[in-house]
Amino acid sequence: MFFPTTQWSLLAKATLDGETQARGALEDLCRCYWAPLREFIRLRGYSEADAEDLTQAFLLHLLEHSTLKKADRLQGRFRSFLLGALVRFLGDQHDRRQAQKRGGGAMHLSLDQQPVELAVSADPGTIGFDREWALVILENALQSLQNQFTAEQQERQFSVLRQFLPGAIDPPAYETAAAQLGLSLPAFKSELHRLRRRFRAAVRQEVASTVSAPHEIDEEMVHLQQVLMDKGTVLAETGKPLPPVS
């Protein structure tokens, strides 16, 4: 099967002065993970302003200290690595601030001195992080799908069918949507079925870019679905959770 270049392999080469492809990966990192990282920090009790500042500081830290180069891609999900690194970073920042309050001189732990396998699953911010991560995955998949339809010069078809995918509010009746596209009801249902298959494929593609091996994709798809179910994210048309992996 096709397995895309993952963030692991690109980000391993990433530095502030890195090559063009690696810098592009860094830009993707900042865009895709900014909201999940900020939400994690905010739910740990930081103010909105502090969460913004700490998110930026953390991403810069990854670059300046080459933390990404030290990551073991064989450990699995990039999401898990990033969250563990953030927990260590916040702990390090806390130690620094406490040392400054005491007048300095206290030793602090660096990001790379603590074990990767931190127990972050019970952290109050983890649910928020996963929620934002799941939404970013869906948004990226939807954008990818829209780009495909635009390239096929089928923008009108996508604008109508999109109303039956995640994020839509009050989708019209099947009959109304079919009439808008000039299709019979059976033909419309067939087109909608094909769209959902393409959407699932786009979601898988997004998830595949965040793991280190193909067999981990299904595990992340299951986790993605559980996160969305827990927060009540549903497909507008049926009220059912994200379709299972086919």
Image: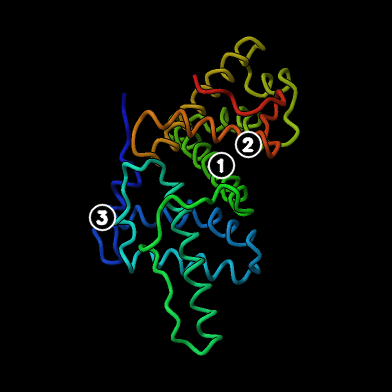
Name the kind of residue labelled 2 in the image: Leu
The foreground one among 94 and 48 is 94
Q: Residue 51: x and y, percent?
A: 58, 66
CA–CA distance in space, label 3 to label 1: 26 Å
Task: Give the image location of residue 49, x and y in percent.
Answer: 62, 71
Marks 1 and 2, Cα distance to the nearest angstrom? 7 Å
Residue farthest to the left, as pictured:
19
Mark 1 or mark 2, which has the lower sequence index? Answer: 1
Q: How far apart are marks 2 and 3 (CA)?
A: 32 Å
Quarter containing the N terminus: top left
Residue 219 percent location from the top left of the image: 47, 31
Q: Label 3 neighbourhood size at 10 Å, few (<14), some (14-19), many (20+)? A: some
Q: Mark 3 points at which residue?
A: 13
Mark 3 or mark 1: whose residue is earlier in sequence: 3
Extreme residue in the top direction: 186
Residue topped by disc 1: 134
Q: Image height check: is 63 above or below 119? A: below
State the residue in front, 185 or 63: 63
**Residue 126: mark:** none
Give the mark nearer the N terminus: 2 vs 3.
Answer: 3
Give the quarter of the image for residue 234: top right
The part of the image, by quadrant, that contains residue 172 is: top right
Residue at 40% over, 53% down: 116
Q: Name the residue rendered at 55%, 35% in the picture.
A: 224
Q: Which amino acid does label 1 sit on?
A: Ala
Say what secondary structure mark 2 lies in: helix
On the image, numbered disc 2 is attached to which residue? 228
Label 3, secondary structure: give it: loop
Residue at the (31%, 48%) spot, across then down: 72
